[in-house]
Image (cartoon, rainbow, N blue to C red):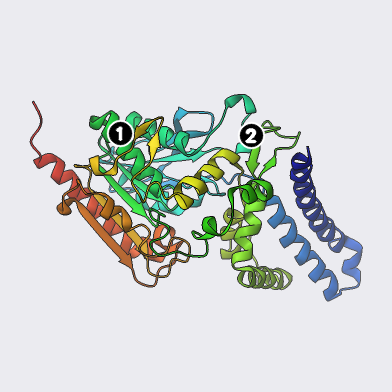
Amino acid sequence: MRYMATYDMMETLRNTNQWMGATAKAMASYPMFAMVPNPAFQWMSAWGEVTERAYARMVVKPGWRLDFVSTEDGKDHLVEVETLLAKPFGDLIHFAVPGRRPRDRKVLLVAPMSGHYATLLRSTVRSLLPDCEVYITDWHNARDIPVSAGKFDVEDYTLYLAEFIRELGSDTHVIAVCQPGPIALVATAYLAATTPEAQPASLTLIGGPIDPDANPSDVTDFGNRVQMGQLEETMIQQVGFQHAGVGRRVYPGLLQLMSFMSMNSDTHGKAFTDQIIRTAQGEARDNDKHNRFYDEYLAVMDMTAEFYLSTVHRIFKQREVARNAFYVQGIHADISKITSVPVIVVEGENDDISAPGQCLAALDLLTGLPDSLKAAHLEPGAGHYGIFAGKSWRNNIRPLVLEFIAGTQEHRKKKPSKV
Protein backbone atom coordinates (compact mmCIF):
# COMPACT_ATOMS: atom_id res chain seq x y z
CA MET A 1 0.00 0.00 0.00
CA ARG A 2 2.88 2.42 0.59
CA TYR A 3 3.69 2.32 -3.12
CA MET A 4 0.06 3.00 -3.93
CA ALA A 5 0.10 5.88 -1.45
CA THR A 6 3.23 7.26 -3.13
CA TYR A 7 1.55 7.03 -6.54
CA ASP A 8 -1.48 8.92 -5.25
CA MET A 9 0.76 11.48 -3.53
CA MET A 10 2.48 12.27 -6.85
CA GLU A 11 -0.89 12.70 -8.54
CA THR A 12 -2.06 14.89 -5.64
CA LEU A 13 0.95 17.19 -6.05
CA ARG A 14 0.36 17.42 -9.80
CA ASN A 15 -3.33 18.15 -9.27
CA THR A 16 -2.54 20.78 -6.62
CA ASN A 17 -0.11 22.61 -8.90
CA GLN A 18 -2.68 22.59 -11.69
CA TRP A 19 -5.27 24.00 -9.29
CA MET A 20 -2.86 26.69 -8.03
CA GLY A 21 -2.15 27.77 -11.59
CA ALA A 22 -5.86 27.93 -12.45
CA THR A 23 -6.58 29.85 -9.24
CA ALA A 24 -3.82 32.39 -9.82
CA LYS A 25 -5.00 32.97 -13.38
CA ALA A 26 -8.63 33.38 -12.29
CA MET A 27 -7.78 35.72 -9.40
CA ALA A 28 -5.51 37.95 -11.50
CA SER A 29 -8.18 38.15 -14.20
CA TYR A 30 -10.86 39.38 -11.79
CA PRO A 31 -12.64 42.26 -13.60
CA MET A 32 -12.37 44.67 -10.65
CA PHE A 33 -8.58 44.64 -10.91
CA ALA A 34 -8.83 46.23 -14.36
CA MET A 35 -9.72 49.50 -12.60
CA VAL A 36 -6.26 49.67 -11.06
CA PRO A 37 -3.79 48.33 -13.67
CA ASN A 38 -0.83 46.71 -11.98
CA PRO A 39 1.94 44.63 -13.61
CA ALA A 40 1.79 42.25 -10.66
CA PHE A 41 -1.60 41.01 -11.82
CA GLN A 42 -0.29 40.45 -15.35
CA TRP A 43 2.59 38.40 -14.00
CA MET A 44 0.31 36.44 -11.70
CA SER A 45 -2.07 35.64 -14.56
CA ALA A 46 0.82 34.66 -16.85
CA TRP A 47 2.36 32.38 -14.22
CA GLY A 48 -1.04 30.80 -13.58
CA GLU A 49 -1.77 30.23 -17.26
CA VAL A 50 1.59 28.58 -17.99
CA THR A 51 1.51 26.52 -14.78
CA GLU A 52 -2.05 25.27 -15.25
CA ARG A 53 -1.38 24.26 -18.86
CA ALA A 54 1.85 22.44 -18.00
CA TYR A 55 0.43 20.34 -15.16
CA ALA A 56 -2.84 19.63 -16.98
CA ARG A 57 -0.99 18.20 -20.00
CA MET A 58 0.78 15.58 -17.87
CA VAL A 59 -2.28 13.35 -17.66
CA VAL A 60 -3.84 13.87 -21.10
CA LYS A 61 -3.03 11.74 -24.12
CA PRO A 62 -2.41 14.15 -27.03
CA GLY A 63 -4.47 13.80 -30.19
CA TRP A 64 -2.90 13.02 -33.53
CA ARG A 65 -4.05 16.32 -35.08
CA LEU A 66 -3.38 15.12 -38.64
CA ASP A 67 -6.10 17.08 -40.41
CA PHE A 68 -5.23 16.52 -44.05
CA VAL A 69 -2.51 15.50 -46.49
CA SER A 70 -1.84 17.01 -49.91
CA THR A 71 -1.47 14.60 -52.82
CA GLU A 72 -0.51 14.61 -56.48
CA ASP A 73 -4.10 15.31 -57.55
CA GLY A 74 -3.77 18.81 -56.07
CA LYS A 75 -6.36 18.17 -53.39
CA ASP A 76 -6.16 18.04 -49.61
CA HIS A 77 -7.42 14.71 -48.29
CA LEU A 78 -8.58 14.10 -44.74
CA VAL A 79 -6.66 11.68 -42.54
CA GLU A 80 -8.58 9.07 -40.57
CA VAL A 81 -7.08 7.06 -37.70
CA GLU A 82 -8.19 3.42 -37.96
CA THR A 83 -7.51 0.66 -35.45
CA LEU A 84 -6.54 -2.49 -37.32
CA LEU A 85 -5.66 -4.66 -34.34
CA ALA A 86 -6.67 -3.89 -30.75
CA LYS A 87 -4.82 -5.57 -27.91
CA PRO A 88 -4.73 -4.90 -24.14
CA PHE A 89 -1.34 -3.17 -24.08
CA GLY A 90 -1.24 -1.59 -27.50
CA ASP A 91 -3.01 -1.20 -30.82
CA LEU A 92 -1.91 -1.34 -34.43
CA ILE A 93 -3.35 1.74 -36.11
CA HIS A 94 -3.46 2.95 -39.70
CA PHE A 95 -3.55 6.52 -40.96
CA ALA A 96 -6.03 6.14 -43.79
CA VAL A 97 -6.35 8.81 -46.48
CA PRO A 98 -9.75 8.29 -48.15
CA GLY A 99 -10.00 9.34 -51.77
CA ARG A 100 -6.37 9.05 -52.75
CA ARG A 101 -4.56 6.31 -54.63
CA PRO A 102 -3.13 3.69 -52.21
CA ARG A 103 0.63 4.03 -51.81
CA ASP A 104 3.00 1.24 -52.84
CA ARG A 105 5.16 1.70 -49.75
CA LYS A 106 3.72 0.29 -46.54
CA VAL A 107 5.53 1.56 -43.44
CA LEU A 108 5.16 0.41 -39.84
CA LEU A 109 6.53 2.95 -37.37
CA VAL A 110 7.47 1.28 -34.10
CA ALA A 111 6.96 3.94 -31.44
CA PRO A 112 9.00 3.93 -28.24
CA MET A 113 7.50 2.76 -24.98
CA SER A 114 9.69 4.98 -22.88
CA GLY A 115 7.35 7.34 -21.09
CA HIS A 116 5.74 9.22 -23.97
CA TYR A 117 2.81 8.35 -26.20
CA ALA A 118 3.17 7.33 -29.83
CA THR A 119 2.02 10.86 -30.74
CA LEU A 120 5.62 11.90 -30.08
CA LEU A 121 6.14 10.70 -33.67
CA ARG A 122 3.36 12.91 -35.05
CA SER A 123 5.72 14.94 -37.25
CA THR A 124 7.37 11.73 -38.45
CA VAL A 125 3.99 10.35 -39.44
CA ARG A 126 3.02 13.62 -41.13
CA SER A 127 6.22 13.65 -43.19
CA LEU A 128 5.73 10.06 -44.42
CA LEU A 129 2.02 10.26 -45.24
CA PRO A 130 2.36 11.82 -48.72
CA ASP A 131 4.53 8.92 -49.92
CA CYS A 132 3.52 5.92 -47.79
CA GLU A 133 0.70 3.96 -46.22
CA VAL A 134 1.64 4.61 -42.60
CA TYR A 135 0.92 2.36 -39.63
CA ILE A 136 2.10 2.76 -36.03
CA THR A 137 2.22 0.92 -32.72
CA ASP A 138 0.00 2.84 -30.31
CA TRP A 139 1.01 1.71 -26.81
CA HIS A 140 -1.46 2.13 -23.94
CA ASN A 141 -0.96 3.84 -20.60
CA ALA A 142 -0.37 1.00 -18.11
CA ARG A 143 -2.43 2.72 -15.41
CA ASP A 144 -5.54 2.24 -17.57
CA ILE A 145 -5.03 -1.51 -18.07
CA PRO A 146 -6.70 -3.77 -15.46
CA VAL A 147 -4.50 -6.21 -13.59
CA SER A 148 -6.65 -9.00 -15.06
CA ALA A 149 -5.04 -8.29 -18.48
CA GLY A 150 -1.86 -9.94 -17.17
CA LYS A 151 1.79 -8.97 -17.52
CA PHE A 152 3.64 -7.17 -20.28
CA ASP A 153 7.41 -7.50 -20.40
CA VAL A 154 10.07 -7.16 -23.09
CA GLU A 155 9.23 -10.60 -24.52
CA ASP A 156 5.55 -9.68 -24.75
CA TYR A 157 6.55 -6.48 -26.55
CA THR A 158 8.52 -8.60 -29.03
CA LEU A 159 5.55 -10.91 -29.60
CA TYR A 160 3.22 -7.94 -30.11
CA LEU A 161 5.56 -6.50 -32.72
CA ALA A 162 5.90 -9.84 -34.49
CA GLU A 163 2.10 -10.16 -34.58
CA PHE A 164 1.71 -6.64 -35.97
CA ILE A 165 4.20 -7.40 -38.76
CA ARG A 166 2.39 -10.64 -39.60
CA GLU A 167 -0.91 -8.75 -39.68
CA LEU A 168 0.44 -6.23 -42.21
CA GLY A 169 2.30 -8.73 -44.39
CA SER A 170 5.83 -9.29 -45.63
CA ASP A 171 5.73 -6.18 -47.86
CA THR A 172 5.92 -4.01 -44.74
CA HIS A 173 8.88 -1.71 -44.15
CA VAL A 174 9.56 -1.41 -40.42
CA ILE A 175 11.02 1.80 -38.97
CA ALA A 176 11.93 1.51 -35.28
CA VAL A 177 12.65 4.76 -33.45
CA CYS A 178 14.99 4.78 -30.43
CA GLN A 179 14.04 2.38 -27.59
CA PRO A 180 12.37 -0.33 -29.76
CA GLY A 181 15.42 -0.61 -32.03
CA PRO A 182 16.81 -3.75 -30.37
CA ILE A 183 13.32 -5.23 -29.98
CA ALA A 184 12.52 -4.68 -33.67
CA LEU A 185 15.77 -6.43 -34.53
CA VAL A 186 15.03 -9.48 -32.37
CA ALA A 187 11.37 -9.52 -33.51
CA THR A 188 12.64 -9.84 -37.08
CA ALA A 189 15.03 -12.58 -35.94
CA TYR A 190 12.16 -14.31 -34.13
CA LEU A 191 10.12 -14.25 -37.35
CA ALA A 192 13.14 -15.62 -39.24
CA ALA A 193 13.21 -18.54 -36.80
CA THR A 194 9.47 -19.22 -36.67
CA THR A 195 7.79 -17.90 -39.84
CA PRO A 196 10.50 -16.77 -42.30
CA GLU A 197 7.91 -15.83 -44.93
CA ALA A 198 6.50 -13.20 -42.54
CA GLN A 199 9.74 -11.19 -42.21
CA PRO A 200 9.39 -7.50 -43.15
CA ALA A 201 10.53 -6.09 -46.48
CA SER A 202 13.14 -3.90 -44.77
CA LEU A 203 14.21 -2.70 -41.34
CA THR A 204 15.24 0.85 -40.44
CA LEU A 205 16.80 1.35 -37.00
CA ILE A 206 16.95 4.95 -35.83
CA GLY A 207 19.04 5.76 -32.75
CA GLY A 208 18.38 2.50 -30.91
CA PRO A 209 20.55 1.05 -28.11
CA ILE A 210 21.44 -2.22 -29.84
CA ASP A 211 24.69 -2.36 -27.85
CA PRO A 212 24.60 0.18 -24.99
CA ASP A 213 28.27 -0.48 -24.21
CA ALA A 214 29.47 0.36 -27.71
CA ASN A 215 29.58 4.04 -26.73
CA PRO A 216 27.95 4.52 -23.30
CA SER A 217 25.96 7.67 -22.59
CA ASP A 218 24.62 8.88 -19.25
CA VAL A 219 21.23 7.42 -20.15
CA THR A 220 22.25 4.00 -21.45
CA ASP A 221 24.92 3.50 -18.80
CA PHE A 222 22.32 4.02 -16.07
CA GLY A 223 21.60 0.30 -15.94
CA ASN A 224 25.22 -0.45 -15.05
CA ARG A 225 25.28 2.04 -12.19
CA VAL A 226 22.33 0.66 -10.22
CA GLN A 227 21.23 -2.73 -8.94
CA MET A 228 17.91 -4.24 -10.00
CA GLY A 229 16.77 -4.22 -6.38
CA GLN A 230 17.44 -0.48 -6.18
CA LEU A 231 15.40 0.15 -9.31
CA GLU A 232 12.48 -1.89 -8.08
CA GLU A 233 12.56 -0.20 -4.67
CA THR A 234 12.85 3.39 -5.92
CA MET A 235 11.10 3.44 -9.30
CA ILE A 236 8.19 1.01 -9.05
CA GLN A 237 4.84 1.99 -7.56
CA GLN A 238 1.28 0.68 -7.58
CA VAL A 239 -1.49 2.44 -9.51
CA GLY A 240 -3.98 4.24 -7.28
CA PHE A 241 -7.68 3.59 -6.86
CA GLN A 242 -8.90 6.24 -9.32
CA HIS A 243 -7.62 4.35 -12.37
CA ALA A 244 -8.74 1.15 -14.12
CA GLY A 245 -5.33 -0.42 -13.51
CA VAL A 246 -5.58 -0.06 -9.72
CA GLY A 247 -2.95 -2.21 -8.04
CA ARG A 248 -0.84 -2.73 -11.18
CA ARG A 249 2.89 -2.25 -10.56
CA VAL A 250 4.23 0.46 -12.85
CA TYR A 251 7.08 2.84 -13.49
CA PRO A 252 4.94 6.03 -13.26
CA GLY A 253 4.99 8.55 -16.06
CA LEU A 254 5.30 11.44 -13.59
CA LEU A 255 8.42 9.87 -12.13
CA GLN A 256 9.84 9.39 -15.61
CA LEU A 257 9.09 13.03 -16.40
CA MET A 258 11.11 14.12 -13.39
CA SER A 259 14.06 12.18 -14.81
CA PHE A 260 13.61 13.69 -18.29
CA MET A 261 13.45 17.23 -16.92
CA SER A 262 16.42 16.81 -14.59
CA MET A 263 18.69 15.90 -17.51
CA ASN A 264 18.33 19.45 -18.93
CA SER A 265 16.86 21.33 -15.98
CA ASP A 266 18.48 24.67 -16.88
CA THR A 267 17.13 24.54 -20.43
CA HIS A 268 13.60 23.65 -19.29
CA GLY A 269 13.66 26.27 -16.52
CA LYS A 270 14.64 29.00 -18.97
CA ALA A 271 12.00 27.85 -21.47
CA PHE A 272 9.21 28.18 -18.91
CA THR A 273 10.52 31.51 -17.58
CA ASP A 274 10.63 32.90 -21.12
CA GLN A 275 7.10 31.62 -21.79
CA ILE A 276 5.77 33.36 -18.66
CA ILE A 277 7.38 36.59 -19.85
CA ARG A 278 5.87 36.22 -23.32
CA THR A 279 2.46 35.46 -21.82
CA ALA A 280 2.63 38.52 -19.55
CA GLN A 281 3.54 40.68 -22.54
CA GLY A 282 0.71 39.24 -24.63
CA GLU A 283 3.08 37.61 -27.12
CA ALA A 284 2.34 33.94 -26.37
CA ARG A 285 -0.10 31.99 -28.52
CA ASP A 286 -2.01 28.76 -27.94
CA ASN A 287 -0.12 26.98 -30.71
CA ASP A 288 3.26 28.68 -30.45
CA LYS A 289 6.55 26.77 -30.52
CA HIS A 290 6.75 26.39 -26.71
CA ASN A 291 3.23 25.05 -26.33
CA ARG A 292 3.52 22.68 -29.30
CA PHE A 293 6.65 21.13 -27.84
CA TYR A 294 5.68 20.95 -24.19
CA ASP A 295 2.10 19.82 -24.80
CA GLU A 296 3.72 16.65 -26.18
CA TYR A 297 6.80 16.46 -23.97
CA LEU A 298 4.88 16.75 -20.71
CA ALA A 299 2.26 14.15 -21.68
CA VAL A 300 3.60 10.99 -20.07
CA MET A 301 2.36 7.46 -19.59
CA ASP A 302 3.08 4.69 -17.08
CA MET A 303 5.07 1.62 -18.12
CA THR A 304 4.40 -1.78 -16.62
CA ALA A 305 6.99 -2.63 -13.98
CA GLU A 306 7.89 -5.91 -15.68
CA PHE A 307 8.56 -4.19 -19.02
CA TYR A 308 10.78 -1.54 -17.47
CA LEU A 309 12.73 -3.95 -15.27
CA SER A 310 13.14 -6.64 -17.93
CA THR A 311 14.32 -4.03 -20.45
CA VAL A 312 16.96 -2.68 -18.08
CA HIS A 313 18.05 -6.18 -17.06
CA ARG A 314 18.09 -7.89 -20.46
CA ILE A 315 18.87 -5.08 -22.93
CA PHE A 316 21.22 -2.91 -20.85
CA LYS A 317 22.70 -5.03 -18.07
CA GLN A 318 22.91 -8.47 -19.65
CA ARG A 319 23.20 -7.06 -23.20
CA GLU A 320 21.28 -10.03 -24.55
CA VAL A 321 20.67 -8.37 -27.93
CA ALA A 322 24.26 -7.16 -28.23
CA ARG A 323 25.46 -10.71 -27.45
CA ASN A 324 22.85 -12.28 -29.76
CA ALA A 325 21.51 -14.23 -26.79
CA PHE A 326 17.89 -13.07 -26.71
CA TYR A 327 15.22 -15.74 -26.32
CA VAL A 328 11.46 -15.35 -26.80
CA GLN A 329 9.36 -18.06 -25.14
CA GLY A 330 12.33 -20.41 -25.26
CA ILE A 331 13.10 -19.71 -28.94
CA HIS A 332 16.46 -18.16 -29.74
CA ALA A 333 15.93 -14.97 -31.76
CA ASP A 334 19.19 -15.54 -33.63
CA ILE A 335 20.05 -12.33 -35.45
CA SER A 336 22.47 -14.17 -37.74
CA LYS A 337 19.44 -15.97 -39.24
CA ILE A 338 18.28 -12.72 -40.84
CA THR A 339 19.57 -13.28 -44.35
CA SER A 340 17.23 -11.43 -46.71
CA VAL A 341 15.88 -8.34 -44.89
CA PRO A 342 17.74 -5.15 -45.89
CA VAL A 343 18.74 -3.11 -42.82
CA ILE A 344 19.71 0.55 -42.54
CA VAL A 345 21.00 2.19 -39.36
CA VAL A 346 20.58 5.92 -38.70
CA GLU A 347 22.44 7.74 -35.91
CA GLY A 348 22.90 11.35 -34.83
CA GLU A 349 26.38 12.75 -34.33
CA ASN A 350 25.31 14.62 -31.18
CA ASP A 351 22.85 12.07 -29.82
CA ASP A 352 23.28 12.17 -26.04
CA ILE A 353 20.81 9.34 -25.40
CA SER A 354 21.76 6.58 -27.86
CA ALA A 355 25.26 7.71 -28.73
CA PRO A 356 26.79 6.96 -32.16
CA GLY A 357 27.95 3.35 -32.35
CA GLN A 358 25.20 1.87 -30.20
CA CYS A 359 22.80 1.39 -33.11
CA LEU A 360 25.55 0.71 -35.64
CA ALA A 361 26.38 -2.46 -33.67
CA ALA A 362 23.35 -4.09 -35.33
CA LEU A 363 25.23 -4.45 -38.60
CA ASP A 364 27.99 -6.50 -36.95
CA LEU A 365 25.37 -8.86 -35.52
CA LEU A 366 23.84 -9.46 -38.96
CA THR A 367 26.49 -11.95 -39.99
CA GLY A 368 24.10 -13.82 -42.29
CA LEU A 369 23.08 -10.70 -44.20
CA PRO A 370 25.09 -9.73 -47.31
CA ASP A 371 26.90 -6.41 -47.08
CA SER A 372 24.93 -5.25 -50.12
CA LEU A 373 21.78 -5.30 -47.95
CA LYS A 374 23.32 -3.25 -45.13
CA ALA A 375 23.53 0.53 -44.91
CA ALA A 376 24.38 3.15 -42.30
CA HIS A 377 24.10 6.91 -41.97
CA LEU A 378 25.53 9.27 -39.36
CA GLU A 379 23.73 12.63 -39.45
CA PRO A 380 26.20 15.48 -38.76
CA GLY A 381 25.24 17.80 -35.90
CA ALA A 382 21.96 16.00 -35.14
CA GLY A 383 20.76 15.22 -31.62
CA HIS A 384 18.42 12.44 -30.58
CA TYR A 385 15.14 14.19 -31.37
CA GLY A 386 16.39 15.58 -34.66
CA ILE A 387 17.03 12.22 -36.29
CA PHE A 388 13.35 11.33 -36.37
CA ALA A 389 11.38 14.57 -36.04
CA GLY A 390 13.51 17.64 -36.63
CA LYS A 391 15.11 19.46 -39.54
CA SER A 392 17.71 16.73 -39.99
CA TRP A 393 14.94 14.16 -40.42
CA ARG A 394 12.94 16.26 -42.88
CA ASN A 395 15.81 17.44 -45.06
CA ASN A 396 18.26 14.54 -45.01
CA ILE A 397 17.16 11.38 -43.23
CA ARG A 398 13.60 11.03 -44.53
CA PRO A 399 14.67 11.20 -48.21
CA LEU A 400 17.47 8.74 -47.45
CA VAL A 401 15.13 6.24 -45.77
CA LEU A 402 12.55 6.51 -48.58
CA GLU A 403 15.29 5.96 -51.15
CA PHE A 404 16.48 2.92 -49.19
CA ILE A 405 12.92 1.54 -49.07
CA ALA A 406 12.50 2.10 -52.82
CA GLY A 407 15.77 0.25 -53.42
CA THR A 408 14.64 -2.71 -51.34
CA GLN A 409 11.39 -2.86 -53.31
CA GLU A 410 13.36 -3.04 -56.55
CA HIS A 411 15.51 -5.77 -54.99
CA ARG A 412 12.39 -7.79 -54.12
CA LYS A 413 11.05 -7.43 -57.68
CA LYS A 414 14.29 -8.73 -59.18
CA LYS A 415 14.60 -11.58 -56.69
CA PRO A 416 13.45 -14.83 -58.30
CA SER A 417 10.37 -16.32 -56.70
CA LYS A 418 10.56 -19.70 -54.99
CA VAL A 419 8.57 -22.50 -56.60
Left or right: 298 in relation to 23: left
Q: Nearer the viewer, residue 119 or 225?
A: 225
Closer to the camera in the image, 64 or 334: 334
Local crowd size for mark 1, using a 10 Å CA cut-off: few (<14), some (14–19), many (≥20) = many
> Percent position (x, y) of residue 132?
31, 45
Q: Residue at x 24, y 44 (%)?
A: 336
Rendering coords of residue 178 (x, y %): 43, 53
Q: Can you say whether 286 is above or below 243 in the image?
A: below
Q: Amino acid at mark 1?
A: Leu
Within the image, what quadrant is residue 171 found in? Answer: top left
Residue beneath disc 2: 144
Neighbours of disc 2 within 10 Å: few (<14), some (14-19), many (20+): some
Q: For the residue marked with disc 2, what is the amino acid?
A: Asp
Q: Which mark is residue 357?
A: none
Among numbered discs 1 and 2, the one appearing first in the sequence: 2
| Residue 380 in view (yes/no) | yes
Name the quarter where the N terminus is drawn. Answer: top right
- Residue 147 location, quadrant: top right
* Residue sitting at x 61%, y 31%: 145
Label 1 – label 2 distance at C-alpha: 30 Å
Q: Quadrant of residue 259?
A: bottom right
According to the picture, the residue beneath numbered tag 1 turns out to be 191
